[in-house]
Image (tube, rainbow, N blue to C red):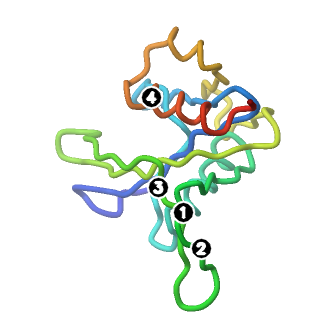
Amino acid sequence: MAHIHEEIDFTASVLIVHKNKVLLRKHEKYNIWLGPGGHIELNEDPNETAVKEAKEEVGLDVTLWDGNRKFNQTEGPHKHLIPPVGLHRHHISPTHEHIDHMYFGTSETDKVVLENPTDEVRWFTKEELDTVDLHPDIKFFAKLALDTLGEK
């Protein structure tokens, strides 16, 4: 998808939990582990983007965790969205930034179907997250997703 703005774009990503593992995808362009995600299109809200990108990139139907939502209204003129668990701004080049809405979600299955067969994806246990080179925020939120949504 083309950038909506030359300097900054809004994105949404989701850390997907199935049983006691969290799914991370190695970003093909930046070579870092992240949750599935992408640009928020002009006709989408962040919740729609997170669910759509999970389906497109890894073939999973995801239910977003709504434990942060304080009020829920889906009828009428206002639709209250599931708030992200994290919101961060980062440079992807010297002249372009993203503001990412990070969500937690669950999937009924761990069977991924990759949009791009050369993509690298992996289900991580909490312990395995310490054995791979991750950005500190991804490691923190991946562990928090497992603590929040993993089987007790």
Residue mark closest to the camera, 3 vs 2: 2
Secondary structure at badge 1 equals loop
Residue type at mark 2 is Asn
The residue at which mark 2 appears reads as 72
Where residue 57 sits in the image (x, y, percent)? 63, 43
Residue 72 is left or right of residue 139, and the answer is right
Please say if the residues under marks 4 and 1 sit with CB atoms less than 8 Å apart. no
* Quadrant for the C terminus in the image: top right
Residue type at mark 4 is Phe
The residue at which mark 4 appears reads as 140
Crowding at mark 3 (Cα within 10 Å: few <14, some 14-19, many 20+): few
Crowding at mark 4 (Cα within 10 Å: few <14, some 14-19, many 20+): few
At x 60%, y 57%, the residue is 66
Q: Residue furthest top?
A: 131
Secondary structure at badge 4 equals helix
Q: Which mark is residue 87?
A: none
Q: CA distance from mark 3 to mark 2?
A: 31 Å
Crowding at mark 1 (Cα within 10 Å: few <14, some 14-19, many 20+): few
Q: Is residue 84 above or below residue 73?
A: above
Front in this rendered view, residue 92 or 137? 137
Q: CA distance from mark 4 to mark 1?
A: 21 Å
Residue mark closest to the camera, 3 vs 1: 1
At x 60%, y 91%, the residue is 76
The residue at which mark 1 appears reads as 69
At x 63%, y 79%, the residue is 74
